[in-house]
Image (cartoon, helix red, strand yellow):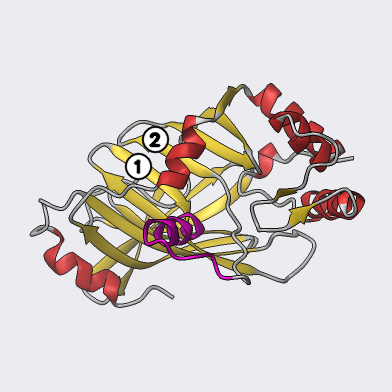
Amino acid sequence: MMKTKVAFFILFLSLCISAQTHRFIYDVEFRKDSTSQVTTQHNYHLDITGDDILYYSRDYFVADSLIKNNISFPADLKLSTSTILKHKKGISTFNEYDLLESTVLDLQTKDVQIWTLTNEKKQLDNLTLQKATTTWGGRNWIAWFAKEIHFQEGPYKFHGLPGMILEVFDDQNNYKFSLAKSENLKESAEDQIMEYAMEISIPVTWEKYKATKLKFYESPVGFMKNANGRSGSSDFFLNDGTVVSTANTREINERLRKNMKTFNNPIELDKLILYP
């Protein structure tokens, strides 16, 4: 549920013009497995800094904060790092950075939603939200946006409405994005983990992207070793902290392959990759 902090933010948004970054934090509830009713929930940040728009998992923010403050990662911390999205305000070309562990793919996409505005409205404290619908990415979407917030942005790749998208969900209840909090940062948001990931990324076409994902699926451990020039016996870590060794290679391969095949319910259903 969107919290009252959203409305409170509007009261002084216009007074914070000097703020370098407007940060919108979304609760994202989704079904990783389309055949299951079980849902997962994560927080994502949408940072607007001048003309730069950045959308990413809060995990990156948490990890970067620990590093900057010289705090060791808790033993039970499991980072579920995911795709980073970047684009320019008013531009529909997105850079989609997909982390295959230590390999980062940079897929450039053109994404435009053709919205149908309805006359249906609802109140959220001092905000008037208007309903809009679209069919995009192989799903039917319903969005609620606020004209009082003048950014024509929203979570993930959703944008182009005459106001900020506070809530958007598909009609099959696979994904729901809800604005939970918003804040102004006095300085531009910087995250060294994401900056490094984008710096080492490899530009790919859709065909190359799909082929690489399928190659990764064949043997995740072998893919990671080849990508980083590791010897057959050297141990290394996954992004979630798991140590990969010769002894557990088969187990890790099976687990990663199973996860890729089972948790294969992308936001853009028309980009579903069928793993054998």
The residue where tag 2 is placed is 87
Q: Secondary structure at mark 1?
A: strand
* Residue 68 horizontal/vertical position (percent): 37, 56
Q: Name which residue type carries label 2.
A: His
Residue 55 shown in magenta: no
Contact, CB < 8 Å: mark 2 with mark 1?
Answer: yes
Screen quadrant of the C terminus: top right
Q: Is residue 272 above or below residue 146?
A: above
Residue 276 relative to residue 101: left or right: right
Residue at 77%, 35% (x, y): give it: 225
- Residue 49 seen in the current view: yes
Question: Can you give x and y, in whole percent of width and height, for residue 23 in the image?
Answer: 31, 56
Q: Secondary structure at mark 2?
A: strand
Q: Where in the figure is residue 247, as x and y percent of width and height? A: 90, 53
Q: CA distance from mark 2 to mark 1?
A: 5 Å
Query: Which quarter of the figure is the N terminus placed in?
Result: bottom left
Q: Is residue 204 above or below residue 73?
A: above
Type of residue at label 1? Ile
User: Which residue: 50% across, 44% down?
Assistant: 84
For label 2, the crowd category at 10 Å Cα-Cα, with few meaning under 14, some 14 to 19 and many 20 or more, is some
Membership of 63 in magenta stretch: yes
- Report whether 162 appears left or right of 274: left
Residue 53, label in figure: 1
Range drawn in magenta:
58-74
Name which residue lies at 75% across and 59% down.
34
10 on left or right of 24: left
Residue 267, x across and y down, in percent: 61, 49
Question: Which is more N-terminal, label 1 or label 2?
Answer: 1
Residue at the spot 72% in from the left edge and 41% down from the top edge: 272
Residue 233 placement, left or right of 83: right
Q: Nearer the viewer, residue 158 or 208?
A: 208
